[in-house]
Amino acid sequence: MTAIDIDFDTAVTQLNALADNRPTFIYEAPDGVNCVYFADGTPSCIVGHVIANLGGSHDDLKLAWHTEDPDAEELDLNDESAVGDLVRHGVLNADEKTEDLLSRVQGKQDTGIPWGRAVAEAIEEVQVLTF
């Protein structure tokens, strides 16, 4: 698997497109508890949709986590940033600003904030930071 290259502008474009398409969508984890990038082989959370839109798949994630478990979703995640794990495991090739943006929007989504607001808030927050 080749890492998916994503820069800040691409992330903003992808996230805005998803938010524009589903501004009031509130993500609910398939199991009711844990956010997953893919469920049943299709994109689930907002970052999963970005990965899929850029050519990634559930199979890519399983390869990145070195598992042959056909039911595996996400393995070996640390408690800091699942998006950071995507970078460390070679799924995404992203700079710190882009990683922070994706992490923030995922965190907001996971707390029940609708995609439109989650994306707008995350972009605004990251744009004021210095990287």
Image (cartoon, rainbow, N blue to C red):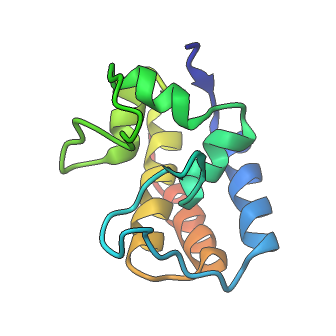
Q: Is residue 1 above or below residue 4?
A: above
- Residue drawn at 33 percent across, 35 percent down: 85
Q: Is residue 75 above or below residue 49?
A: above
Q: Can I make out residue 94 in this image? A: no
- Residue drawn at 50 percent across, 82 percent down: 113
User: Which residue is at the far top?
Assistant: 2
- Residue drawn at 42 percent across, 29 percent down: 62
User: Which residue is at the far bottom?
Assistant: 24
User: Which residue is at the far front?
Assistant: 70
The spot of residue 69 in percent (x, y) is 34, 30
Left or right, 130 with reference to 120 = left
The spot of residue 129 in percent (x, y) is 45, 53
Of residues 53 and 129, which is closer to you in this image?
A: 53
- Residue drawn at 38 percent across, 78 percent down: 111
Left or right, 66 with reference to 79 = right
The spot of residue 124 in percent (x, y) is 57, 67
Q: Is residue 120 above or below residue 89?
A: below
Q: In which quarter of the image is the C terminus?
A: top left
Q: Quadrant of the N terminus?
A: top right
Of residues 130 and 27, which is closer to you in this image?
A: 27
Tag count in the figure?
Answer: 0
Q: Is residue 22 above or below residue 106?
A: below
Left or right, 93 with reference to 67 = right
Q: Can I make out residue 47 in this image? A: yes
